[in-house]
Image (cartoon, rainbow, N blue to C red):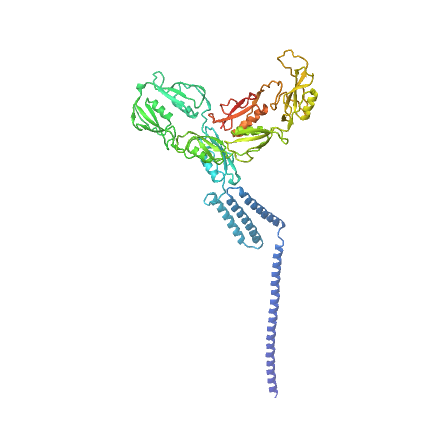
C-alpha cells in the first residue's frame, strides 16, 4: 500500500513539473512577445522623431535663406528684364534688328535659367536646371560665333550705303528703289572721277526709314578753267613735261618735233606760253628731234588705248608722220587710239606716214526726252558722259519736273561730251494773290506775262492796291493771254473851284479834301493874293493824296517877262506830311504848269552777294536783285534779268561772268532806265 502511494506521488510530481515547465515556456514566450512589441514601439517612435526632426530642419533651412542673397538675385533679374526691353526697343534703329532681338531674348532666358538652377541646386540639391542653363550659354556662344563668321545670316533693315567714290547712277537707282528724294550739286574735282560722288548729306548706314532726302555732291571732273602757273620748261625732257601735263590736267596741248643738231634729242626747245594760264588754253611745245639722219626704223608698238597726246609723242620722237581719223567706239575711251595702220609690230621708217584712228566715244542716239524726269535725264547724262544745261519754265501741258523740250530731237546722233539743253516743266503757272501793283508787276515781268492795268476809284482800298484781276486766284494762266489788273486809285476827290480864294483859304480847302497843293505866283492885274488859276479843272475827280498846282495873283512885275516866278508853300495835309512839289497828270490843265522833275540818279548802290548765294533758283534770285536795288533806289529803276549757261562753271542762280553787274560792287542807277542782270541758268 505504501509503495503504491509512493509511485502515485512520483507520477503526480512529474506531471506537475511538466505543467510548470510548459507554463514557464508559455510565460517566456509571452514575455518575448512583450519585449519585441515594446522594442518595436520604442524604435518606431525614434524613427518618427528623426523624420520629424529632419523635416523641421529642412523647413528651417528653407525659411532661413539669406536676406542679402534674395535682394541681389531680385535686382539681377530686374536689371535683366530692363536690359531686354531696352535692347528690343533700340533694335528698331539698328541694321541688324533681328540679331539684337535674338541676343536679348537669349540673355533673358539664360539669366532666368541661372536663377532657377541656383535656387534648386542650393536648396533642393537638384542639378537639372544647372545643366540646362549651361547648355543655353553654350548655344548662345555658338549662335554668335556662327553669325559673326557669316555662316548664319539674318534679315537686316534697309540702310543708306556709302556712295562716296561710287557712280552717281548707283545712288540714283538706290534712291528711286527706296522712294527717297535726292538732290545733286556738281563740283569740280581733281581727285574724284567725273560723275562719281564726292560726299553725301546723310551718314552711311543710316536707316532708310529715317531719311527723307539725300543730297549728293558729285564730281564734274577737273575744272579746265582753273588757272595754274606754267613754268618755263625750256631744257626739260619731254617725259617730265608729259608728267606735268597729266598731273595738272592740261587738256589743250600740242607737241611738235623738229630737227636740231645743237640741242639734245627729246629736250624742250621752246613753248608759246608761260606764267598764269587756264588749263584749257592752247599750249604748244617744240621738242628737239636731234639729228634726224641718226633715227632708225622702229617696230611699231601697240598704240591701242593710248591717249592721242602720248601716241603723237611716241611717233614724233621717232620721226614718224601720222594722220588722224575719227570713229565712234563703245570700247575705247574718247580721245584714245582705236587702231593704227599699219598694225602694231610693223617696221616703220622715219618720215613714213601712218594713220591713227581716234575714238569719238560711243555713238549716242538721242532718245525721246520729252516727259522724262530729272533722274532719268541725269542717268542718261552720266551713262553717256554728256553735259546737261538745265532750265525750266511753266507749262500747262507737261507735268512739273518733266522735260518739255531739248535742243536735240529723238534719233539725233551725238558724241560724248556734247552739251544738251533740256527745259523742264514747272507745271502750270497759277494766278497768285497780290496786294499791290508793284508786287504783281515784278512777278509778271519775271515770268514773261503780258498784262494791262486799269485804274478805278475805290473807297475801300488804298491807292495802288489791286481790286481784282481778270484771272481768279488759283486758276491756270495761259502764257499767251493778257491779264487785266484793276488797280485802286484810292478815294475819289472832286476838285472845287479855287478861283478867288486866298492862299490860306485854298490851303485849308486842300487839307479838308486830303489833297496836296503846290502854290506859285504869277503877275496879274486881278486882285493880288487871290487864286487866279488851278492845274486841275473844277469838277475833275482825282485820288486822295494827289497834288494840284494853284496859281496866286501878284501885282509885282517880273524882271524878265519870259520867266514865271514860282513859290512853294508848305501844305498841311491831313496826315501831317509835307506836300510834294509836283503836278498830277490827271485832270485838265489851265494856265502854266511847273517844269517836269528830272529823273533821279542813285549812286553807290551795293549789289549784295546774299541776293544770289542763298539758293540755286535763277528766277527767285532775279526777284531778290530787283527788290534789293529798288529798295535802295525807287520803283522807277527798272531791273530785268536774262539767263545764260556759264562757261566758267558758275553755279546755277549765281551772276554770270558776262553780267555787267557783279556782287560785292557798287553801281549807279537812274530812274526810268533799264538795267539787265545776267544770271546762270
- Tell which of 97 and 18 is nearer to you: 97
Give the mark count. Answer: 0
Query: Is the residue 363 above or below the residue 634 in the image?
Result: below
Residue 79 x, y percent position in the rendering: 58, 46
Query: Is the residue 218 above or below the residue 673 in the image?
Result: below
Please tell me which residue is depicted at 60% across the width and 87% down the height of the picture: 4
Residue 639 x, y percent position in the rendering: 54, 24
Residue 321 x, y percent position in the rendering: 32, 23
Q: Looking at the image, can residue 361 be seen? A: yes
Please tell me which residue is depicted at 63% across the width and 56% down the height of the picture: 60
In this view, which residue lies farthest toward the front? Answer: 526
In this view, which residue lies farthest toward the bottom? Answer: 1
Residue 20 falls in which quadrant of the image? bottom right
Residue 565 falls in which quadrant of the image? top right
- Tell which of 647 and 226 is nearer to you: 647
Please tell me which residue is depicted at 53% across the width and 43% down the height of the picture: 92
- Tell which of 513 and 189 is nearer to you: 513
Left or right relative to 511: residue 350: left
Amino acid at each position: 500500500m505504501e509503495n503504491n502511494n509512493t509511485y502515485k506521488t512520483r507520477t503526480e510530481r512529474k506531471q506537475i513539473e511538466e505543467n510548470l515547465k510548459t507554463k514557464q515556456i508559455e510565460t517566456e514566450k509571452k514575455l518575448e512577445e512583450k519585449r519585441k512589441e515594446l522594442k518595436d514601439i520604442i524604435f518606431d517612435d525614434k524613427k518618427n522623431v528623426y523624420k520629424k526632426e529632419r523635416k523641421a530642419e529642412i523647413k528651417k533651412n528653407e525659411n532661413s535663406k539669406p536676406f542679402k542673397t534674395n535682394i541681389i538675385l531680385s535686382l539681377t533679374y530686374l536689371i535683366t528684364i530692363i536690359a531686354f526691353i531696352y535692347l528690343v526697343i533700340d533694335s528698331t534703329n539698328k541694321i541688324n534688328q533681328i540679331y539684337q532681338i535674338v541676343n536679348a531674348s537669349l540673355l533673358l532666358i539664360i539669366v532666368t535659367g541661372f536663377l532657377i538652377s541656383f535656387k534648386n541646386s542650393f536648396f533642393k540639391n537638384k542639378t537639372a536646371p544647372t545643366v540646362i542653363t549651361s547648355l543655353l550659354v553654350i548655344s548662345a556662344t555658338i549662335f554668335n560665333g556662327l553669325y559673326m563668321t557669316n555662316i548664319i545670316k539674318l534679315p537686316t533693315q534697309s540702310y543708306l550705303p556709302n556712295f562716296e567714290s561710287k557712280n552717281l547712277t548707283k545712288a540714283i537707282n538706290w534712291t528711286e528703289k527706296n522712294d527717297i528724294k535726292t538732290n545733286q550739286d556738281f563740283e569740280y574735282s581733281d581727285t574724284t572721277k567725273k560723275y562719281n560722288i564726292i560726299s553725301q548729306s546723310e551718314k552711311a548706314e543710316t536707316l532708310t526709314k529715317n531719311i527723307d532726302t539725300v543730297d549728293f555732291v558729285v564730281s564734274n571732273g577737273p575744272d579746265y578753267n582753273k588757272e595754274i602757273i606754267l613754268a618755263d620748261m625750256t631744257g626739260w625732257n619731254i617725259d617730265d613735261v608729259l608728267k606735268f601735263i597729266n598731273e595738272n590736267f592740261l587738256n589743250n596741248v600740242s607737241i611738235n618735233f623738229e630737227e636740231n643738231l645743237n640741242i639734245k634729242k627729246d629736250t624742250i626747245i621752246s613753248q608759246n606760253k608761260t606764267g598764269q594760264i587756264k588749263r584749257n588754253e592752247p599750249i604748244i611745245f617744240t621738242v628737239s628731234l636731234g639729228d634726224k639722219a641718226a633715227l632708225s626704223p622702229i617696230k611699231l608698238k601697240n598704240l591701242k588705248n593710248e591717249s592721242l597726246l602720248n601716241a603723237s609723242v611716241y611717233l614724233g620722237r621717232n620721226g614718224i608722220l601720222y594722220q588722224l581719223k575719227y570713229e565712234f567706239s563703245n570700247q575705247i575711251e574718247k580721245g584714245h587710239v582705236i587702231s593704227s595702220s599699219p598694225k602694231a609690230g610693223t617696221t616703220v621708217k622715219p618720215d613714213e606716214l601712218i594713220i591713227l584712228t581716234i575714238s569719238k566715244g560711243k555713238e549716242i542716239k538721242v532718245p525721246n526726252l520729252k516727259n522724262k524726269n530729272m533722274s532719268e535725264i541725269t542717268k542718261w547724262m552720266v551713262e553717256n558722259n554728256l553735259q546737261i544745261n538745265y532750265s525750266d519754265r511753266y507749262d500747262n501741258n507737261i507735268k512739273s519736273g518733266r522735260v518739255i523740250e531739248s535742243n536735240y530731237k529723238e534719233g539725233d546722233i551725238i558724241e560724248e561730251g556734247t552739251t544738251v539743253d533740256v527745259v523742264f516743266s514747272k507745271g502750270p503757272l497759277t494766278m497768285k494773290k497780290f496786294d499791290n501793283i508793284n508786287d504783281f508787276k515784278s512777278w509778271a515781268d519775271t515770268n514773261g506775262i503780258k498784262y494791262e492795268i486799269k485804274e478805278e476809284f475805290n473807297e475801300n482800298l488804298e491807292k495802288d492796291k489791286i481790286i481784282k484781276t481778270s484771272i481768279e486766284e488759283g486758276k491756270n494762266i495761259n502764257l499767251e493771254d493778257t491779264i487785266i489788273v484793276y488797280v485802286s486809285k484810292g478815294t475819289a476827290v472832286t476838285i472845287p473851284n479855287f478861283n478867288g480864294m486866298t492862299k490860306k483859304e485854298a490851303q485849308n480847302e486842300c487839307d479838308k479834301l486830303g489833297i496836296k497843293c503846290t502854290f506859285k505866283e504869277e503877275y496879274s492885274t486881278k486882285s493880288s493874293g487871290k487864286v487866279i488859276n488851278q492845274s486841275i479843272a473844277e469838277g475833275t475827280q482825282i485820288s486822295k493824296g494827289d497834288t494840284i498846282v494853284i496859281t496866286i495873283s501878284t501885282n509885282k512885275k517880273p524882271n524878265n517877262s519870259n520867266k514865271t516866278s514860282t513859290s512853294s508853300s508848305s501844305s498841311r495835309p491831313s496826315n501831317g506830311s509835307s506836300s510834294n512839289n509836283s503836278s498830277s497828270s490827271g485832270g485838265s490843265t489851265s494856265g502854266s504848269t511847273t517844269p517836269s522833275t528830272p529823273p533821279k540818279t542813285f549812286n553807290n548802290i551795293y549789289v549784295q552777294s546774299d541776293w544770289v548765294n542763298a539758293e540755286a533758283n535763277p528766277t527767285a534770285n532775279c526777284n531778290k536783285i530787283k527788290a534789293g536795288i529798288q529798295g535802295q533806289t525807287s520803283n522807277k529803276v527798272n531791273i530785268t534779268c536774262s539767263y545764260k549757261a556759264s562757261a566758267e562753271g558758275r553755279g546755277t542762280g549765281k551772276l554770270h561772268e558776262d553780267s555787267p553787274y557783279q556782287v560785292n560792287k557798287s553801281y549807279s542807277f537812274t530812274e526810268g532806265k533799264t538795267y539787265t542782270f545776267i544770271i546762270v541758268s
